[in-house]
Amino acid sequence: MQKINNIHDKNFYQLVDSISNLNEEELLFKIKFNYSFLPKNIKTSLENYFDKYKFWGSLHEDNLDYDEIERKAKTIKKHIKDFVWLYEKLEDDSSKFLLYAILNNFINYDFTSLQKTLNQKYHHYFDFDILPKMKEEVFADIGSYTGDTVLDFIKCYGENSYKKIYCYEITTDIIPTLKNNLINYKNIEIKSLAVSNKSKTLYIDENSTSNSANKTKNKGKIKIEAKSLDEDVKEKISLIKMDIEGDEELALMGAKKHIQNDTPKLLISLYHNNHHYYKLPKLIHSYNKNYKFYLRNYGGSLYPTEIVLFAIPK
C-alpha cells in the first residue's frame, strides 16, 4: 500500500507507476528518446565522463553505442520494487527526494531536481543533521586517499572525537602524502591494504585519469594484499566510511561481524554501480536490522555521483 504524505511521495510513486507500465524495451526506447533531445554539449560531457570512469558502461550516440543506457534500463525495470523498498526505508524527505531525483535523472535526464539535492551545507560524509556529534570513535576509513576525509572528520568534531583511526589505501604512490597529511595527529594507523570479503591477493586497476579512481581486480601486474575488516581489526568499530570505486559490496561482506556485533555508523559511497542503490542497504539490513537509512548528494547535477548512504544505529 503506497503511503502518500507529501509531494515527494506523489512524484516518486507516479514515476514508479510509469516505469511499471513499460516493458524493458519500451523503457529503453524512452530513455534513448529523452537522451536524443539533450544539447550537444551535455551529451559530450556525459559521454566523456563515462569514458573517463568506466563504472556504468559506455555511451557514444554517434556510434549507436548505448551500453550505459541499456544497463540502466535493465536495472531499473528488473529492480523497481527494490528501489521502492529503499524509498520506504529512508528516514527523511531529503533522502526520499534524492532517490526520486536519481531515478528521474536516469530516465528523463532531469538535472534540476538533482541540482536541488546537492548538499553544500556540510562537509562530505559529515552531515550534522544526521551525525551531530562524535565521541571516542574507532573509525575505519576505507579508501583514505590523501586523508581528506579524516581531516574533515577532525575539523568537524575535534581531535578528542576519536580513540583510533584506521586508514586503508591501495595506491602506494599516495601513501607518503597520506602519512604527511596526518602526521600531526595521534592514534592513526595507515594500512597499504585493500579491504574485501576475505584475505587474498588482488591487483590494482589503475585509472589513467586519476589515481583517486584506482580500484582492484583479480588479475594484473601491480599486486595488493586484501583483508576483510573482520579479520584485520579485532576491536569494536564505531564508524566505517567506504569509498572504494565499486568494491563496497565485498568490503561490507567482509565487515559482517562488525556490523552485526558493533552496529557501527556506516558512510558508504553508493553510486559506483547502479545495483548498489538497493543492494548495499539490503545487505546491511540483512546483517543488522537496527539501522536507519539516509541518502545525501555531494556530487554533480548532470549525473548522480558522490551519493552517500548513511546507515545510522536506531
Image: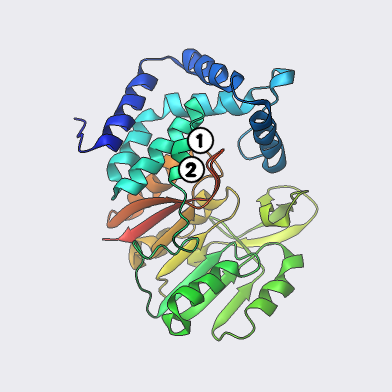
Foreground of the two, 281 or 72: 72
Amino acid of disc 2: Gln
Determine whether, in the image, residue 55 is placed left or right of residue 270.
right
Q: Residue 115 carries which label?
A: 2
Amino acid of disc 1: Phe
Q: What SS does tag 1 mark?
A: helix
Determine whether, in the image, residue 159 is placed left or right of residue 283.
right
Residue at 58%, 71% in the rendered image: 167
Quarter of image, res 11: top left
Res. 222 in view: yes
Q: Residue 220 carries which label?
A: none
Q: Position of residue 109 (x, y in %)?
A: 52, 29
Q: Position of residue 277 (x, y in %)?
A: 45, 42
Question: What residue is pinned by disc 1?
Answer: 111
Residue at 70%, 60% in the rendered image: 224
Residue at 64%, 32% in the rendered image: 42
Q: Position of residue 310 (x, y in %)?
A: 40, 56
**Tag 2: Cα neighbours inside 10 Å, few (<14), some, or many (≥20)?**
some
Q: Do the residues labelled 1 and 2 touch (CB within 8 Å)?
A: yes
Determine whether, in the image, residue 106 is placed left or right of residue 132.
right
> Which of the image's four quarters has the C terminus?
bottom left
Q: What SS does tag 2 mark?
A: helix
Foreground of the two, 181 or 242: 181
